[in-house]
Amino acid sequence: MQAPILLPGALSELFVHATNTGRITLADRYGLMAALLQEELDSEERRAIDRLLRAVRKGSLVVVNDLSAIA
């Protein structure tokens, strides 16, 4: 099975979108999964993922089952 491919710049867009909306959607979670499955994350991308996960744990971000934040 092939690992999902993350588009360049997608992680930073995901980070900005999640922090602006306060929500992590199903599509965001798949994006995070794709990023974590890549073996070549740089330190900035790793810190962004850590910050998102920490925000979820603190309750600053809410995990929702919506497919996308676009209504």
Image (tube, rainbow, N blue to C red):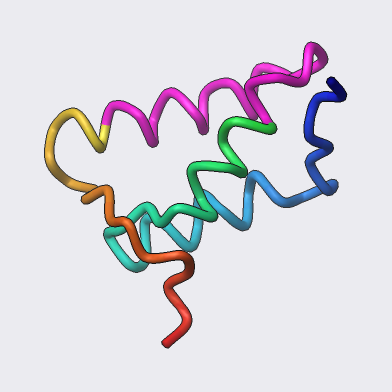
Q: Which residue is found at the position 68% from the left and 33% from the top?
A: 34
Q: Which residue is found at the position 65% from the left and 44% from the top?
A: 11
Left or right: where 44 falls relative to 51: right
Left or right: where 56 falls relative to 35: left
Q: Which residue is found at the position 84% from the left and 46% from the top?
A: 8
Where is 26 relative to 51, above or below? below
Q: Which residue is found at the position 64% from the left and 29% from the top?
A: 45
Residue found farthest to the top: 39
Magenta segment's dominant SS is: helix
**Number of numbered tags placed on the structure image:** 0
Residue 14 magenta-highlighted:
no
Q: Position of residue 2 (x, y in %)?
A: 87, 24
Magenta residues (range): 35-54
| Image quadrant where one finds the C terminus | bottom left
Where is 41 relative to 17, above or below? above
Q: Nearer the viewer, residue 30 or 48?
A: 30
Q: Position of residue 39 (x, y in %)?
A: 79, 12
Left or right: where 59 falls relative to 46: left
Q: Position of residue 13 (x, y in %)?
A: 62, 57
Where is 29 relative to 28, above or below? above
Residue found farthest to the bottom: 71
Q: Position of residue 29 (x, y in %)?
A: 49, 42
Residue 37 magenta-highlighted:
yes
Left or right: where 26 falls relative to 4: left
Residue found farthest to the front: 1
